Image (cartoon, grey):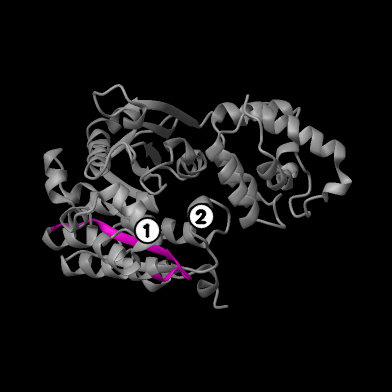
Amino acid sequence: MRCVRPLIFCLLVLCAGVVCGAADADAEVPARSEGGQLQQVFRERLEALDLSGSQQAAVRRLVVEYRGRLRSEAFRRAFADLLTDEQRAKLARLRGAPRPPTDGQLKVTRDVAYDEADDSLRSLDIYAPADARGLPVMVFIHGGGWRQGDKGQATEKGRFFVERGWLLVSINYRLSPAVQHPVHIEDVIRAVAWVKAEIADYGGDPERISLMGHSAGAHLAALAGVDTRRLAAEGLTPSDVSSVILLDGAGYDIAWQVNELGGLRAGPMFRGAFGDAEEGWNDASPVVQAKSAADLPRFLIFHVASRDDSRRQSERLADAVRAAGGQAAVVAAAGKTHGTINREIGLERDPVTAIVMRVLTAIEDGEDPFTPENLASTEERSGE
């Protein structure tokens, strides 16, 4: 059993309402002076959950990000996404609540190997309606700086897409520093090839595959849509992907990113994943690879409105896709952070989710997906 370090505990105690179970979703977190008993209960439950060091650090960031509204639905879901299924079930039991009911419409198949290697980092989870047949497929690629993250973080996305008549496949891939480029993208494309070959057995339509990625996963989703050489090695072409949805990536032109930011901000992360040679950076850059591609999928590229590097990278990628004869749209996500643009996919009234679903529906219906109305925020559509 891990012990919670004092500094982390002081921050995590703000989450007591989430862990101990609060009724008022909009209430402020109770002051520590109100809750010696509450703190004791929280400490016991936190220790019982046996959070890893990375989970503790992630919760600490959530506390800062959602300060003052830690019992909101968005925070609850973000917190739940950090837990494993076993931890969520244990938390429910500790709170005296029944275990989450099994949704008869949702079937989850976990840890399916997409590679012959016996390796959890080369596996995927499939979320599907129990009676799925011929449904469109969304492949989700997690972020984490090419160094961390896990397919299990997509549980709520899986439920959201299944409720809307989709399958969702969440994939793992090998991570740095144990590996460098091109291993990440080779794993991702191999996973897409597995989906193409096998997803019909799970109720999906192999002719209607879309990709979605966040952060480093956005880079990999973009590269999987344009890297004709590596796609061909798995018997695929860019046209095997219907659409690519990118959530606040900044690795679409790696040489530009490293040379622009350099040093402490970009150097260690990008060099750790892609090495020190500019040749390797270009090989891993969707902006560069798109120049020699054809029959590209449609690219819907979101960036946090206040994040300039992501905006500039998004525009460079969109320009490269259009220059290659493809369609691309860039959307600035106002009021989002790098974390919330991903975590809030599927929340009611989330504007990014609304745009995603309008675009996907238009593609499914054979219509122009990138009309001004489809790309407008909720406020713009209502005339506010």
Magenta residues span: 293-308
- Amino acid bearing label 1: Gly
Q: On residue 249, which mark appears?
A: 1
Locate residue 304 relative to residue 83 in the image: left or right: left
- Amino acid bearing label 2: Gly
Quadrant showing the C terminus: bottom right
Q: Does the magenta portion include 296?
A: yes
Quadrant housing residue 367: bottom left
In this picture, is 189 found above or below 265?
above
- Secondary structure under the numbered disc 1 in the rendered image: loop
Report the residue that reaches farthest toward the bottom.
Answer: 384
In this picture, is 86 found above or below 242?
above
Q: On residue 339, which mark appears?
A: 2
- Secondary structure under the numbered disc 2 in the rendered image: loop
Q: Nearer the viewer, residue 163 or 349?
A: 349
In this picture, is 213 found above or below 86?
below
Q: Point out the tag, 2 or 1, that comes first from the N-terminus.
A: 1
